[in-house]
Image: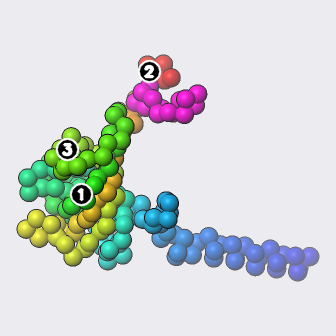
Amino acid sequence: MLKFLIKIFLFVILLSHFCFSQNLLDSNLVVVENLKFNQISILQLLSNPEKYHNQIVTVSGFLHNKLEDSALYFSKDHADFGIIENSIWLEYSDSLTVHYSNQGDLTLDSQSDIKRLDCRYVELRGRFNKNELGHFDVFPGTIENITEISELLKWYDGDTELFGYDKATGKIVPMNREGN
């Protein structure tokens, strides 16, 4: 019986070491079609720029696409008040795929088309560069060569669910008053 308890004890120790190792806790790495990128929050990026330097990242935030303010902010309030230290400068690739929540995918040829996503919450993917500090060198870093940007849906308005998953069609649909 003692040998059995010792084996269980060792198994639990090994399992806990494996499950709580630093590599697993820090792993935000996602692999899609042999492309590796980190799906992280803007807070992780701002607080650990060295960790994500020169890596492909996917991050969400509030988009400002204005003259001298092409940046992803932590929130709408931070964008409205120009809190630059909570934002990342943005540079788009020549070929950019945009996912609109209500119009499907569009591949854009000009940056002027991205104005449609100005002042909206988005998720985007590009390479983070901690050494490029954006316009007038005042931003904490730059996401360069952005290849993909998606408009995010607002799922809730307070307690009211705005969208839901329709099991029959497998699609995200607006909720009706009865809750679908």
Residue 169, x across and y down, in percent: 55, 29
Viewer-proximal residue among 65 and 157 = 65
Q: Are marks 2 and 3 in contact (CB under 8 Å)?
A: no
Tell me which numbered mark, 2 or 3, is placed earlier along the sequence: 3
Q: Is residue 105 above or below residue 50?
A: above
Mark 2 and mark 3: Cα distance apart in space? 32 Å
Q: Amino acid at mark 1?
A: Asp
Q: Secondary structure at mark 2?
A: loop
Residue found at x 58% / y 31% = 167
Among the 4 quarters of the image, the one containing residue 16: bottom right
Q: Amino acid at mark 2?
A: Asn
Residue found at x 30% / y 46% = 107
Q: Which mark is residue 94?
A: 1
Q: Is residue 175 left or right of residue 63?
A: right
The residue range painted magenta reads: 161-175
Residue under circle 2? 176
Residue 10, x across and y down, in percent: 76, 79
Residue 39, x across and y down, in percent: 42, 60
Task: Name the mark nearer the viewer: 2 or 1.
Answer: 1
Q: How is the image coloured?
A: rainbow
Residue under circle 3? 113
Q: Is residue 57 left or right of residue 93?
A: right
Q: Is residue 91 above or below residue 120?
A: below
Residue at the far top: name it.
Answer: 178
Tell me which numbered mark, 2 or 1, is placed earlier along the sequence: 1
* Residue 34 in view in this figure: yes
* Magenta highlight on residue 147: no
Mark 1 and mark 3: Cα distance apart in space? 12 Å
